[in-house]
Image (tube, helix red, strand yellow):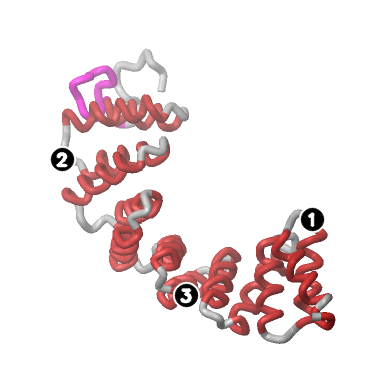
Amino acid sequence: MNPDYKFCPNCGCPDEDRTSSHYWEKQSMRSRRNGKTRDAIEANKKYIEIDNKDPHAFKNLGDLYYYTGQIELSIENYLKSLELKDDFADTYYYLGISYYRCGKISKAVESLEKCLELNPDFIIGYYWLGITYYHKGDRQKAIDSFEKLIELNPESIIANYHLGVNFSSVGEYEKAIPYFERVISASPDDEAVLYHLGISYFRTGKFPKAVEMFRKSVKLNPEDNRSKKMLEFMLNVSEV
């Protein structure tokens, strides 16, 4: 906005009244758009000093702290936002991810579940819920979350990867194979998936396919010691 304007051309509010929460809200948004995140934080804090009853102001401040890596402060502000508005799925979503980044896995699960309870169509929430369940050690709930994600968003290749990893982690290699194969079909040079698919083939007795995957992985990355060791084992197994 032209700094010479005394009134906002969009809403007609005075542009230079620094005692107005609207002024500092606008300054925060302007700084955020210009990539000046720390200036946006300071403006948002002034906004809250004037009006501490707006849940969106705390939510926005939580976002800004999240972007600058100040996760504890982001959590603090998301919680304040939820005290004022406890049915905002978006806030629970970002709170869940913030808890996850702090290693507070159980709290992350609770927040993400609340997000999806309020809005079952919050598709990306199923991805992060699956991730948090995986790290919590609840493989079945992780699988359920990624399956729901694929149901709602069949194009999600990364969900196929995580389903493959979760099935293989509980020894269900046959179920893991089609998910890894879908990832390889979309991304043939994914070394991690080539290795996991090779292991799944190996565990289900599909030895030629396993060798093929390990060879592809080593060709892409000669430093891939996991695949190299599996190749050495499989190609020399008759001599053991």
Please report the residue visible at 43 percent of the width from the left and 27 percent of the height from the top.
36
Query: Closer to the camera, 111 or 34?
Result: 111
Asked whether disc 2 touches disc 3, contact meaning CB atoms under 8 Å apart, the reply is no
Q: Earlier in the sequence, mark 2 or mark 1?
A: 2
Image: 110 above or below 21: below
Q: Earlier in the sequence, mark 3 or mark 1?
A: 3
* Quarter holding residue 45: top left
Residue range in magenta is 11-23
**Callout 3 amino acid:** Ile
* Label 1 residue SS: loop
Q: Nearer the viewer, mark 3 or mark 1?
A: 1
Labelled disc at residue 154: none
Q: Which residue is mark 3?
A: 143
Q: Which residue is mark 2?
A: 53
Q: Residues within 10 Å of mark 2 (few under 14, many from 20)?
A: some
Please report the residue visible at 52 percent of the width from the left and 73 percent of the height from the top.
166
Please report the residue visible at 73 percent of the width from the left and 58 percent of the height from the top.
224
Quadrant of the image containing the N terminus: top left
Q: Which residue is mark 1?
A: 222
Taking the view exactly as shown, the residue that stands out farthest to the front is 240
Q: Nearer the viewer, mark 2 or mark 1?
A: 1
* Quarter holding residue 15: top left
**Callout 2 amino acid:** Lys
Magenta stretch contains residue 19: yes
Image: 205 above or below 9: below
